[in-house]
Amino acid sequence: MTELDEIRDSLEGVVPGVVSTCAPDGTPNVCYISQVEYVDREHVALSFQFFNKTRQNVLANPHAVAAVMDPESAAVHRLYLGYLRTETAGPVFERMRAKLASIANATGMAEVFRLRGADIYRVERIEPMPGKVLPKASRRRGLSALRACSDALSRAKDLGQLIDGLLEGLAAHFGIEHAMVLAIDRAGGRFYALASRGYGDSGVGAEIPLDVGAVGIAASARVPIRLAHAAADYAYVRAIRETAAKDPLWASRLELAIPFPGLPDPHSQLAVPIEIDGNVLGVLYVESAEQRRFSHEDEDALVTLARQLGLSMRGYDVEEAVPPSAGPTPSVGRPLVVKYFPENGSIFCDEEYLIRGVAGAILWKLLGHHLREGRSEFSNRELRLDRALGLPEIADNLEARLLLLERRLQDKQTGLTLRRTERGRFSLLVNRSVTLSELGSSR
């Protein structure tokens, strides 16, 4: 007996499916359908876009038959379905809505393809239809690639090595050249880039809003979002540039000084949430200029790696107190002028933007202790106890914020270096004399 997992390639939407329903009086109806979405091993979702005869039939007679084709082998299977319910929100609906935008853009029917709901069906049985079946190409990736990436993650000694190892592994073992990890800042209404690979600039610290595109949907719905074709509303570089130009209020939500490290017109995208204990800490995002670049096997592999990443992130954050250390403040070269704007936590070094938000408040705190007490050693614990920093009580992403700060200091070559020493401990190395200037009010 054919299982649904065996024909997932037929549910990619490359070849439109056909669905057949029947009215109570026995009159049949057959039409094409945009999506037959895999939900789990026993269920699929059909896209509900129009109040048409198919919809009327299903509500009156909750049975349907769908035919789907594998785009590579041309194998066709018939699915016998039992209608259960229609979802107009939630993970399945959001995933299908994003995919439909991709399909609509590829077919030039963006105004017609609008998802009203996701009709959930139980798959009662699957039968192959007669016809010639072509051989399928061997898989380029598989469990060996997943194992190699997982092994690299298990060897990482800090969050930076963890994320870099993941991005390097995706390139080496999955052939995914353009990838990034974004952390979430719910209070600030944004994601910020922690690391990227395959772009001209690292873009560390670049921001996008929480509610935009595949990354936003993946985080809010807590499901992977995979787009097989170009979708204008989901191209981040273009969306940020065009929307910021015509909507200053929208642009004010972000710090645009750091360019976002994305492809201008990606034709394939995959966004996977990174979670710990049910809390989304960020998103693993990959993209390609090639259509249909990411398969459902790629999606399954990245979901697995994102889960391992989330679990490992928790392991790098052991809270340990560190005794204060004292030492003279160096006076090499001209002083570094650090300006701080408490209203949004922005830091400028020698009039050049560095960082903002919680990471900016952390750097200001560290520099203050360094100048007043000569300290260079600090701990995660003392940062968490300082309520003035504005860390959320749950899923504070402290390690991610410290990594962001570390890499921004490295990119800007300010003479300040953040370095991890042990788990839950780090040091601030100051290689120039520093002058601090606080501007504005925190109120």
Image: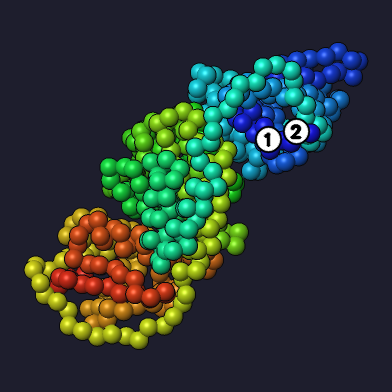
Q: Where the C terminus falls, by quadrant?
A: bottom left
Q: Residue 141: x, y in percent?
A: 51, 41
Relative horizontal placement of residue 46, taking residue 292 as reference (left or right): right
Picture quarter with the N terminus: top right
The type of colouring in the image is rainbow
Residue 276 is labelled as none
- Amino acid type, mark 1: Glu
Q: Residue furthest right?
A: 25
Crowding at dot 1, Cα within 10 Å, few <14 / some 14-19 / many 20+, comes out as few
- Secondary structure found at label 2: loop
Give the residue displayed 47% in from the left and 53% down from the top. 149
Q: Amino acid at mark 2?
A: Thr
| Placement of 243 over or under 314, stated as above or below | above
Q: What residue is rendered at 70% in x and 16% in y? A: 131
Q: Nearer the viewer, residue 442 or 292?
A: 292
Indicate whether 29 appears above or below 409.
above
Q: Determine crowd level at label 2: few under 14, some 14-19, many 20+ residues with C-alpha closer than 10 A.
A: few
Q: Position of residue 298 (x, y in %)?
A: 53, 41
Provide the residue designation for mark 1: 6
Q: Kindly indicate the quadrant of the structure image that contains residue 390.
A: bottom left
Q: CA distance from mark 1 to mark 2?
A: 7 Å
Q: Which residue: 64% across, 30% down? A: 11
Residue 29 in view here: yes
Residue 441: percent from the left, percent from the top? 32, 65
Question: Decide: marks 1, 2 in contact (CB < 8 A)?
Answer: yes
User: Total number of numbered labels?
Assistant: 2
Q: Nearer the viewer, residue 125 or 30?
A: 125
Residue 221 placement (x, y as % from top left): 60, 46
The residue that mark 2 highlights is 2
